[in-house]
Each structure stands twice: as structure tokens, then as C-alpha cells.
Amino acid sequence: MNPILEQIRFMRKIVGFGRLMRMRKKHSLGLGYARGYVTTICLWSLLNTGLLDELREKGAVNLAEFADRNNLDLAALESVCEYLDGLRVLRFEQGVCSLQKRGTTLMEEPRGLFDLLYGYEPVFRDLEPLLRKIKTYGKDITRRGEAVAKGSGELGRQLPFLAVRELVFSNGFRRVLDLGCGDLEFLFLLCENPEIICYGIDNDAATVEYARKRLKEANLAHRITIEQGNMFAVKEAAQKFRDVDAITAIDVFHEYLSNGTDTISFFLRTVKRHFPDASLVVAEFFKLPQSWLRRIPTVTLEHHLFHSLTNQVILPIGEWVKLFESSGYQVVEKKLLHAIGHGYFVLK
């Protein structure tokens, strides 16, 4: 008899065919959630040790040599690769590892999801103490800022940066000041239009140093100026960047809403006073109704959870518009992408 049929007959005899099928269905459901967790942890380990990037670059890697070069436990590394081989993410044979098609795909656009989630991993690791009020976010628990910035940047380049660039181009703006400019990826995209001159402000010294390095390599120093500074120092910015006709802010404002809207409202009124002729081009996440997420559980579901647990406030569309208008701006253009819970506004 076929060995598999013999096993099925034996299990059927023990528990019955109907119960066997119900158990299989329930275990499949549970395994989907458990496997997602285990797979993510394994991918993080291979990303952080550099193996996945080396596989992308070289195509195939000898694990013993890689483990020796990076002072890794070979047996543990092989166990992880064997697991991912079973999921057809990697191919691991005779000590050599390579990416399968599924793994290659995960290292493309979806990689930003894994980097972003790694940034919030400390929050989920201590979720129970957070729930029990034993630990508090911001005091006992913090996210990994570098990983959050990396993941956000990778995801931003796929759509949000392009959406804001389209609004800048279509409205004919030529002198752009970007708040929280990060690694300059967005400003590099704007400079694809040879008529645009860009300025960037970021308050993180390490980020600004890295951005200046990238700027030098890109040979765009004649069109992009970057300053380390506080975006709330509006008067000083207005004195430095007098000729801007647009100010861009991509996912900046929601970081300052944990104590209400007064901080951003005051900031917007100040910007209006010191840059009276400049438009604002704003990209912000907006809160989707629970009924919508229940019906269409996109990645916005995770995004809302990340932000709620870390005291970041995501406003519904109506409240964003109310905030802009009460601060002296008129919404002259609005684009909404419900699939990712992201809104784009041109304010004047």
C-alpha cells in the first residue's frame, strides 16, 4: 500500500475522517499565523547578518565560509536556511545557499515592510508588559528609529514620494523646501526636473551627515541645499530660504499630535505668516474606519496598530482638513489612497 494512504487510514481509524479534516483545517489556520511570526524572525536574522544582501549580490553563498567570516554559529544558520528552504524562500543544498523566486520578491518592494516592522519589534516584544501597565512607551520601551526611517524610506520611494512629486510637478513649483528631508531620496526625485531647486531641513545630525555624503555622490550640490535644524524655527528658515514657492512635508505632522493639534496648528499659522506666498504640499496618513479595515484589511491595519501603540495620532480625513483650514490654509487639491490610508494635499 502507498505509505501516505496507509498513514491516512491509520489516522482515520484513530480520530475519524470527519474530525481529521476539521482538525487539519483548524491547524492550517493556526499555522498561517504562527509561520508568519517564525518566518519574519528568520528573515530579520538573515537581513541583519547580511546574508540576504550577499545572496542578492552574488547569487549563491557557501554558508560555512559566510559563518566563519561573520563569526556566526554555523549550525544555527543552517537550521534557519533549511527552514526557509522548506518554505521555498531559499534553496539550501550541499552547504550552498541561494534565493528562490519567492525570496527574491521579498527582498524587493516588500523588504520595506520587514525593515519597518523590525523598527517596531521592541514594542511587540514588550506588548504584554505594556498592556499590564508595567512598562510605558517612551520611557521603558522605544522603537528602533533607524529601522523605522529605513523602512519608511523604502516604502516611501515606491508610491508616496512619487505622489508628492507629481503634485509638485503638476502645480509648476520650482523652489521647494522639504521638512524632515531624511536621506534626500525625495529631493533627488524632484531634481529629475532640471528647473527645480531644492532645500532640505532635518534635525538629526547623523541623518544630515549621511544626506550630505549622498548629495556629494549624486553631484547635485548645485541644486540641493541641506541644513541641520528644527523645522519649528520658521522665522530662521524664512530668512535662509526666501524664494521658496512650495514647502513639502511627508508624514511629518502626525508625529506631533500626541497632545492634540495645537502644536501643528501653531506651526502652520507661523509658516503662513513667514511664507505668505508659498504653498504647502502635505502627505499624511489618515485614519480609516474600522468597518473599512474589517472589509479590506490592507497594510493600513498594521500601520494603525504601530502608531496607536507608540502614541502617534492618525487623524481622519475630515479632521486633517479642519486642522489645515483653521490654521489659515485652503485645501486647493486633495488626493486620497484608501489602499494605504494616505492623503495628499496642496494647501494655499
Image (cartoon, grey):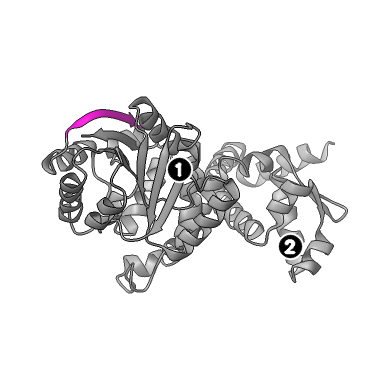
Residue 257 visible (yes or no): no
Q: Which residue is mark 1?
A: 187
Residue 40 located left or right of residue 270: right
Q: What SS does tag 2 mark?
A: helix
Query: Which of labels 1 and 2 is toward the front?
Result: 1
Q: Position of residue 34 (x, y in %)?
A: 55, 52
Position of 271 with respect to 162 (left or right) is left
What element does badge 1 sit on? helix
* Residue numbers of the magenta segment: 330-338
Q: Which quadrant of the figure has residue 138?
A: bottom left
Image quadrant in which you'd find residue 71: bottom right
Sequence-wise, the earlier of marks 1 and 2 is 2
Q: What distance separates the C-alpha of mark 1 from that of mark 2?
A: 40 Å
The quarter of the rendered structure image containing the C terminus is: top left
Question: Which quarter of the image is occupied by the N terminus?
Answer: top right
Q: Which mark is residue 52?
A: none
Task: Determine if residue 200 is in view.
Answer: yes
The stretch drawn in magenta includes residue 156? no
Q: Nearer the viewer, residue 324 or 170?
A: 170
- Residue to which mark 2 is pinned: 77
Q: Residue at x 34, y 53 (%)?
A: 307
Looking at the image, the residue that sits furthest to the top is 170
- Neighbours of disc 1 within 10 Å: few (<14), some (14-19), many (20+): many
- Check disc 1 and give the amino acid type: Leu
Q: Determine the residue positioned at 25% across, 51% down.
A: 238
